[in-house]
Amino acid sequence: MAKKSIWISPEGDYLATELIKLRVTNLKLTMQELAEEFNALHGKEYGIEVTSRSVQAKLTAIKRKENQDKVKWASPGVSLYFAYLLSFFPDNDFEWFAQKLNETFPHIREEYGPFSSYQAKIRKGFLKDKGRLPNIGMETLRVVNKIERQRLESDETIKKIAEVERALIKARTELSWRKKKDKIVFENRNLKDLILEKIEETVTPFSPVKVPRAIVPRTTRKTKESVVLMLSDIHFGEKVSSKETYGLGGYNVETAVRRLQHLSDSVIRITQKQLRGYAFSKLYVFGLGDWVNGTIHEELAKTSELNVVEQSHSLAYVLSQMILEWSQVFPQVKTIVISGNHSRLYKKQPYKERYENWDYNTGLFLREMLRNQPNCQVEIPNSIIDYQEVENHVFALMHGDDIPASGSTQYTGIQKALFKLESIQGGKFRDVLRGIKREYRGLETRERGEKNAKIAEKLLRDIIDNGAKYLIDNVCMGHYHTVVTLQNGDILMNGSVIGSNEFSVANFLSGVPVQRLFGVHPERGKTWEFSLRLDVADKEHKRIRYKLPPELEEKGLIK
């Protein structure tokens, strides 16, 4: 039978280590089998014969010792203080480290035994493996500061360490505060402001062109009106394969630019040559969304010829050239940019700050590029619905993707949505009208005179300025890629520039690329209308005069 002293003999540590190795590699052995195996390996050499009880007692003692060591290093401040010492004295004098630990934590030494240089060496290796050396966190410094504060008076070395520590804490605190402040400022700044700032720094406006004189009809036969162009669903940047759409579609950057050039030529030809009996003082461009292709769908991002930033910037560059041509024909050109759904930043359409998308950014680019042109105005509403007064008639502008389907066709849902919109707007008008009625009835009890006349004039202006804007005459929308007129002409749905693509053909929704152009009379409202087919430009093969930004010319997208 083996004596207990065998484990504390000079060979005891080695034998204990061999016992642990044997146990780890033979976990299924019983204690009796383990003792027999151990005796077979080492009994003859060392003249020993251990029993199963002795083996079990030794393993239990080793386990208890390991647990005590774990408790020691898990005690508050021990590991942190050790890491702190290593950061200032990263040498291999582990005897010194063990001495420092025993001096600093006497209560742990008395309860669990002293720290040894071997334990300090093992702990350093652990910290290094975990990537915790020599980086010290704020929690480390706080614990060390608490420990060292008690010994500042007796140890000059610790005093110096404490001074360095306080300076380090102060520097880290200031850095952390600055980072938090910068993060808060960045998060609170609107994405719109950040993008606008970059646009103003990088975009060079186009040189102004000659502005035509205000149109005054030479004869009484001239009809004075304004022109409205509905411009939507360009999907600039998308690439459509003619082979995959059975020849019904075919689209790329070159096709888009060619069709937009044809659209510009058509607007000028119709308004200046075909409609000679009219005098047009202003052109309204209703941008109804989905101007750019976007990246919300993986297949669009994969096949697109341009990334989304290039889509936005390039389209604004092309549209600026188109609008500058119109500004030489019309005394005033006003462009309104409504955001669509393809240009959104997230896969799911948000409702808060929804305007922050790439259509909106295209409008910012466009406004900056046309900044020097005096007769061009670009409006970029934050709302998904905007109201524009054209020749005393109110037009509601929207993309249309928020309207839910209802009934057997999508048009039923659109009509229901219009009814609700008219009800909401009508309620606002009634509120304005009630307030004006109360003031007007007060005039009846007063004496008539100049003062009452001025009040009556003010009430009339309130009706015109504050109330009439809620009376919608027409709704203009895009999204559906189809030219449709609903509800006796009150709802005007626009086509697209892209035409058919793989999705529309697969869902039997293909249509031709077409945009709407119409006139608005001060009394009669919407009058004449043209549906401008754009695929005609694909067959004409005219020279493309519009340019892409200089940094994209080398890509050879326009031949």
Image (cartoon, rainbow, N blue to C red):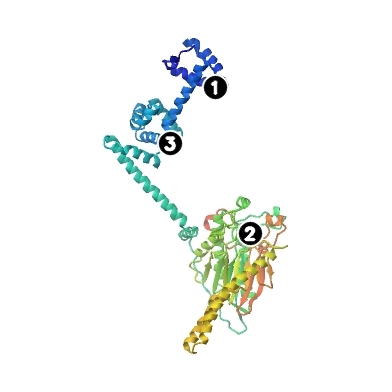
Q: Mark 2 near mark 1, Cβ–Cβ under 8 Å?
A: no
* Viewer-proximal residue among 145 and 264: 145
The residue tagged with tag 2: helix, strand or loop?
A: helix
Relative to 423, is 513 above or below?
Answer: above
* Residue ID for mark 2: 255
Relative to 404, is 99 above or below?
Answer: above
Q: Is residue 9 left or right of residue 215?
A: left
Q: Quarter of the image holding residue 82?
A: top left
Task: Tell me where residue 338 appears, x and y as whole percent.
Answer: 57, 64
Task: Tell me where residue 262 appears, x and y as whole percent.
Answer: 63, 65
Q: Disc 2 residue type?
A: Thr
Of the two numbered discs 2 and 1 in the rendering, the one whose residue sits closer to the viewer? 1
Task: Tell me where residue 511 appears, x and y as whole percent.
Answer: 70, 61
**Which of the two discs, 2 and 1, labels the residue nearer the N terminus?**
1
How far separated are the C-alphas under marks 3 and 2?
Answer: 58 Å
Relative to 5, is 119 above or below?
Answer: below
Residue 132 badge: 3
The residue lying at 50 percent from left, 60 percent from top is 192
**Which of the two discs, 3 and 2, labels the residue nearer the N terminus?**
3
Residue 112 visible (yes or no): yes
How far separated are the C-alphas under marks 1 and 3?
Answer: 31 Å
Numbered circles on residues, count: 3
Relative to 129, is 428 above or below?
Answer: below
Residue count near mark 3 (Cα–Cα under 10 Å), binned few <14, some 14–19, many ≥20: few
* Viewer-proximal residue among 211 and 516: 516
Q: Disc 1 residue type?
A: Thr
Residue 92 visible (yes or no): no
Task: Tell me where residue 140 appears, x and y as whole percent.
Answer: 39, 39
Of the two numbered discs 3 and 2 in the rendering, the one whose residue sits closer to the viewer? 3
* Residue ID for mark 1: 25
